[in-house]
Amino acid sequence: MKPESKSKHLALSKQDIDHFCSYLLAERGLALNTAASYRRDLEKLAQYLADKGHTLRTANHVMLVGYFQSLAQGGKAPSSIARAGASARTFYQYLKEEELVQDNPAIGIVTPQPGLYLPQYLGQAQVAMLINQVTGSSPSKLRDRAMLELIYACGLRVSELVGLNRDDVHLSERYVRCLGKGGKERIVPIGTPAAIAVEDYLQRGRGKLLRRYKNEQALFLNQRGSRLTRQGFWLILKQYIRAAKLPEDVSPHTLRHSFATHLLEGGADLRTVQELLGHADISTTQIYTQVTPQHLIKVYQQCHPHAKTALSPEKK
């Protein structure tokens, strides 16, 4: 292959990798180091494909199988191959959801199974500390308070949060209507603190941010009066994370994890949490049971007959 053709293929793949890594940080809430690992894995795959005259988008299933076979034959550790497989599967699922490819070529590719992923979450006091960093009555501060209250109170993905329109929030009925992955609509209740913060923003903040975009339907606006982006929310959140002295790898998705974990700790059943999160498969929701052992013990003690039967003193 001509060097210029290979360079062109690599450049096209790099654009997709750049967009994907931005998505990992803003939407999935992964740490910078994790996103960097995904990038390295995909860059190696892109190099392999460019040598064969293809980009990441034009790769097919057979090519990907060949790539992972080459990793195994080259003596790569099973854990490294597993990570590379996870990177490819997540990347191509992203391309499919963004309608950038018609089919997912990574489906059916078998690699060594990686270890269990446990989601990071904040304690209730930490969430309160984060939200309480937002003080003041300027339009942007009212917006920031409303966004933090709402994303935690409803367990929204950051794309769902910034994708909300003014008419999606029903304060009198206390619910929000959002569109999740695949355009699936769901209804999520709004708690009192979030409802108060959103109402305050609508009454005293949003109108001042609108500026010349009088017909803008977005709920949350940037300083130019147009819809706030995922990256914009990420930058806003970062400043409050630093102010609250929370770990640097806290992300928008950390708040979603916290929402789910706190519901389970409070006694919610897994099916309810699944519905509120908008998970298509309950196996995705079950990961939260790994980080809430107190909840499992509580449910066991309440529900299992032997757990509720105490030994009498004479039987001890």
Image (tube, rainbow, N blue to C red):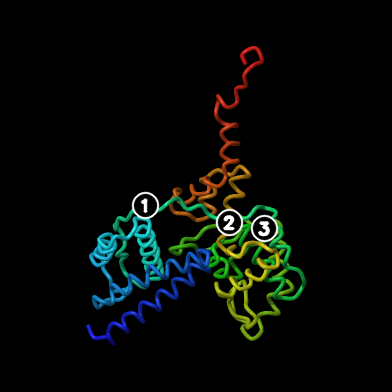
Pick whichever of labels 1 and 3 is earlier in the sequence: 1
For the point 48% across and 70% down, which residue is it?
A: 23
Distance Cα–Cα, label 2 vs label 1: 34 Å
Q: How many marks?
A: 3
| The N terminus lies in quadrant | bottom left
The reply to whether dot 1 and dot 3 touch (C-beta < 8 Å) is no
Q: Is residue 41 shown left or right of residue 133?
A: left
Q: Amino acid at mark 3?
A: Val
Which residue bears the numbered disc 3?
Answer: 127
Distance Cα–Cα, label 1 vs label 3: 33 Å
Q: Amino acid at mark 1?
A: Gln
Residue 213: x, y in percent?
61, 83
Residue 105: x, y in percent?
29, 65
Q: Amino acid at mark 2?
A: Val
Pick whichever of labels 2 and 3 is earlier in the sequence: 3
Q: Is residue 304 above or below residue 18?
A: above
Residue 188, disc: 2
Residue 200, disc: none
Residue 113, disc: 1
Distance Cα–Cα, label 2 vs label 3: 19 Å
Secondary structure category for the residue under label 2: strand
Quarter where residue 302 is shown: top right
Question: Callout 2: few (<14), some (14-19), or many (20+) C-alpha neighbours within 10 Å?
Answer: many
Closer mark to the observer between disc 2 and disc 1:
1
Q: Is residue 1 shown left or right of residue 17?
A: left
Q: Is residue 116 above or below residue 52?
A: above
Question: Callout 1: few (<14), some (14-19), or many (20+) C-alpha neighbours within 10 Å?
Answer: few
| The C terminus lies in quadrant | top right
Question: Callout 3: few (<14), some (14-19), or many (20+) C-alpha neighbours within 10 Å?
Answer: many
Residue 78: x, y in percent?
34, 55
